[in-house]
C-alpha cells in the first residue's frame, strides 16, 4: 500500500488565469523531509497554498493527507487543515496573549474541551521545541528563533500527518536558522513528515534531503550535488 501523504499527478496551478506551475507530478511519503526550492516568483508559495486549500486545484490530480484537492469544498478545509501543521516565515503568533494562551486558542478552535488534556498537550509540544519553561511569556518577549519554535509547537498540536513550513527560517539569522532547523530535524526523526519551502541553500548543504525545485513552471526533483 502506498505511504504517500501527498501526491500530485499532472496538476496545473493557477493564480487567477495565470498558469504558475504545469504538469506537476510529485510525491511525498510518510516520514520524509522534503525541501521545496526555487527562485522568487517561481511558484513555491502558490504550491504550498494549494496544499492547504488556500488556492483551488483547477486541473489534474492532487491528494493530500487523504483529501482530494480537486473536489475539496470550502466546508472540507477545516478538516484538511487539522491534519496539516503549517509554519510561516512571520510566525503568526497572537501578540496579545502568552505562549500558552496562543496554543490554548488553537486547541479550543479545533474542538478540544478537556482542560487537563489541553494542558498536557501544550506541555508536550512545547517540550519538543525546548520552550516549556517560557510558556508564560508574550511573543514580543521572545527572540525570532524562540517565536518560530512556538509556531512549530503550535503546528504539532493536532498530531499533523504533514507539516508544511513556508520559509520558516526566512526572518532568522544564520545561527538561529540552524537552531530552528535542528528542531525540525528532531521532529522529523520522531516520525513527522515535513515539506519545507526555503531559499536557504546553506541549510540544504548542512542537512541534505530530498529536494524539489520550482523552475520554469515545473516542479522536479533535483540531485543535491547540482542544486
Ligand atoms: N494573488 C495573486 N494573484 C495573481 N498572481 C499572483 C498572486 N500571488 C502570486 N502571484 C504570481 O504567481 C507567481 C508565483 O508566485 P509565488 O508567490 O508562488 O512564488 P514564490 O516562489 O513563492 O516566490 P517567493 O520566494 O518570493 O515567495 C508570481 O509570478 C506571482 O506574481
Image (cartoon, grey):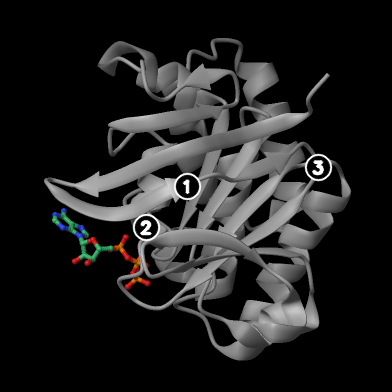
CA–CA distance in space, label 3 to label 1 = 21 Å
- Relative vertical location of residue 115 with respect to residue 8 in this rendering, above or below: above
Query: Which residue is drawn at the image coordinates 42% and 39% (left, top)?
Result: 11
**Mark 1 Cα-neighbour bin, 10 Å: few <14, some 14–19, many ≥20:** many
Task: Select label 2 or label 1 by which is in front.
Answer: 1
Residue 177 is situated, as x and y percent measured from the top left of the image, at 62, 79
Q: Is residue 2 left or right of residue 52?
A: right
Query: Which residue is drawn at the image coordinates 44% and 60% (left, top)?
Result: 218
Residue 83 is situated, as x and y percent measured from the top left of the image, at 57, 26
- Relative vertical location of residue 46 with respect to residue 112 in this rendering, above or below: below
Label 3 near label 2: C-beta < 8 Å? no
- Looking at marks 2 and 1 on the same chain, the residue that comes earlier in the sequence is marked by 1
Query: Which residue is drawn at the image coordinates 48% and 30% (left, top)?
Result: 62
What count of labels does the image hold? 3
Instruction: Indicate which disc residue 24 carries.
Output: 1
Displayed quadrant of residue 149: bottom right
Which residue is tagged 2?
A: 45
Which residue is tagged 3?
A: 31
Amino acid at each position: 500500500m502506498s505511504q504517500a501523504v501527498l501526491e500530485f499527478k499532472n496538476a496545473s496551478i493557477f493564480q487567477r488565469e495565470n498558469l504558475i506551475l504545469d504538469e506537476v507530478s510529485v510525491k511525498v511519503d510518510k516520514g520524509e523531509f522534503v525541501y521545496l526550492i526555487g527562485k522568487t516568483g517561481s511558484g513555491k508559495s502558490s504550491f504550498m497554498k494549494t496544499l492547504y486549500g488556500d488556492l483551488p486545484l483547477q486541473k489534474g490530480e492532487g491528494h493530500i493527507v487523504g483529501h482530494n484537492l480537486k473536489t475539496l469544498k470550502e466546508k472540507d478545509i477545516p478538516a484538511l487543515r487539522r491534519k496539516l501543521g503549517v509554519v510561516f516565515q512571520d510566525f503568526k503568533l497572537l501578540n496579545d496573549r502568552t505562549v500558552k494562551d496562543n496554543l490554548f486558542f488553537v486547541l479550543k478552535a479545533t474542538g478540544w474541551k478537556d482542560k487537563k488534556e489541553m494542558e498536557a498537550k501544550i506541555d508536550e509540544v512545547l517540550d519538543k521545541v525546548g520552550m516549556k519553561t517560557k510558556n508564560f511569556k508574550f511573543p514580543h518577549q521572545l527572540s525570532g528563533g524562540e517565536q518560530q519554535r512556538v509556531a512549530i509547537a503550535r503546528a504539532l498540536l493536532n498530531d499533523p500527518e504533514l507539516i508544511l513550513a513556508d520559509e520558516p527560517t526566512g526572518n532568522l539569522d544564520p545561527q538561529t536558522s540552524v537552531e530552528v532547523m535542528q528542531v525540525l530535524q528532531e521532529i522529523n526523526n520522531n516520525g513527522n513528515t515535513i515539506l519545507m519551502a526555503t531559499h536557504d541553500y546553506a541549510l540544504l548543504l548542512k542537512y541534505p534531503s530530498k529536494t524539489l525545485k520550482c523552475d520554469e513552471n515545473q516542479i522536479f526533483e533535483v540531485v543535491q550535488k547540482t542544486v
